[in-house]
Image: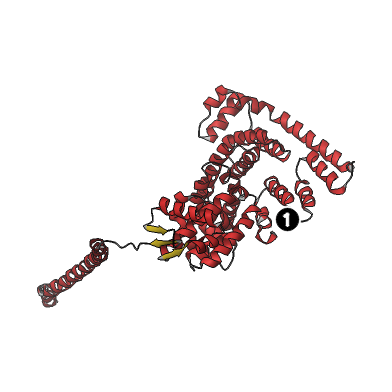
Amino acid sequence: MAEYDLTLRMIPSMDRQLAFPLLEFLSSRKIYKDVLKAQVDLLSNTGMVDYTGELYKMLHGVDELPAEFEEKRKKVINDLLESEQKTKHIREVIENPEVAGLLRQDKLQNMKLLCDNYQCTPEMVLELYNFGQLQYSSGNYGASADILLHFSILSTDPELTLSAMWGKLASEILFGNWEIAYSDLLKLRETIDKTHFKTPTEQLQQRVWLLHWSLFVFFNHPKGRDGIVETFMMQHYVSTIQNACPWMLRYLAAAIVTNRKKRSMMQDLVKVIEQVAYMYRDPVTEFIEALYVDFDFDRAAKKLEECETALENDFFLTHAVDDFVENARFFFAEVYCRIHKRIDMTSLTERLNMKQEDGKKWIVKLIRESRMDAKVDFKENTVIMNPTYNPVYQQVIERTRALVFRSQVLNGAIDKRGNSTNKKDTSKNKPRPARRHNDNAIAAQ
């Protein structure tokens, strides 16, 4: 099971608290040893002292915590109280509905308004950022989301504003507020695409983070499977996947397979999978490669079985296993039926890893729903595919369409060449200017 796990590859591109649910999932699946120790180490640098202490007791089998835990707890509480006091005035001001109605898109104008009329300073705005960070570190995700939103509205520092957007997105994800998280994700994607970073590497890193963080949103929001295909198939993000995180293809492939509305994207997905096959492979990408590139149905059937194991132990896809397998069988049978003229239902059912009776019913249902031109012979236990040909007139249209276009291009090239030849001939036939003035000048000399 560990060979299909992507957690160790993904954690470096995630925030500590975002990575924690992945470790909890691994602990429940018992894929690795010492996961509890990794959880304690992961939270040791956060403000979640009480929760970290409980995990520490479980890890070491003790009832009492070291003195350092109490000291750290007091420091976290003092920092929160101090920052809360420093931001009390500005929070009261911006939470006033009358003041909120006066704020505009111009951040400099907003800051001037707050300074002149409400005695709010840039230092107070910066303290909002610090207070939001402290709340997030302590696990108060609802409070941190609100505070970082206020900071983003007021701050004139683009780097800190971008950082606050990341913090707010993480807060909404961990709070489980998927509607707002989806909206924040799209805003962050737009900001990253429009921002001029110091180096291309920095922008690439931002996109890598976005791809990883977006999985929490896309696999929990009702429109997520459309959103992940739309985002991941953008040219910038395809390049990011190819160059920095090819393992993200598992999630793109799963989204396309489980969303038949996006089946038109399958060929584009196949191209990307082929391009990065030398860098990354897993059962999901190999299933698609075997089915659409090699047309190796035995290998595709084997990889589909492996997909079940891989997805069951994937934090983001564990709830989509049945949906994936059902739709993957659909794609498998569709390609199989279009290639073969006579199909043995027993053989196809075995390849799909289904019981004979269930498999036959499923194949009949598939033919009916996909409107294939086929006939089922229950006596022979076969499906006979009727070959489909375009009408003669349609074939003529298709073949002559390209011919007409090429003829137009050729005529245009001939016309251009003829025009250029005529211009040269005209220039040759023009009368030369008289040399009378030159002769007169010589005579004058």
Left or right, 333 with reference to 411: right
Rendered image quadrant of residue 428? bottom left
Secondary element under disc 1, as helix, strand or loop, is loop
* Along the viewing direction, whichever of 278 and 111 lies nearer the viewer: 278
In this rendering, the answer to whether 375 lies above or below 413 is: above
Task: Look at the image and tell me in which quarter the C terminus lies.
Answer: bottom left
Give the percent coordinates (x, y) of residue 156.
58, 39
* Residue bearing the label numbered 1: 31
What is the tally of numbered marks visible in this picture?
1
Q: In the visual, does 332 lie left or right of 417?
A: right
Residue 290, above or below 106: below
- Image position, residue 366 (x, y; %): 45, 53
Residue 121 pos. (x, y %): 64, 31
Q: Quadrant of the N terminus?
A: bottom right
Between residue 178 and residue 344, name the one nearer to us. Answer: 344
Q: Residue at x 79, y 48 (%)?
A: 40
Dividing the picture into quadrants, the one containing residue 159 is top right
At which x and y percent is residue 386?
A: 35, 62
Q: Nearer the viewer, residue 294 or 107?
A: 294
Q: Residue at x 31, y 63 (%)?
A: 389
Q: Is residue 283 above or below residue 138?
A: below
Asked whether residue 245 is in view, the answer is: no
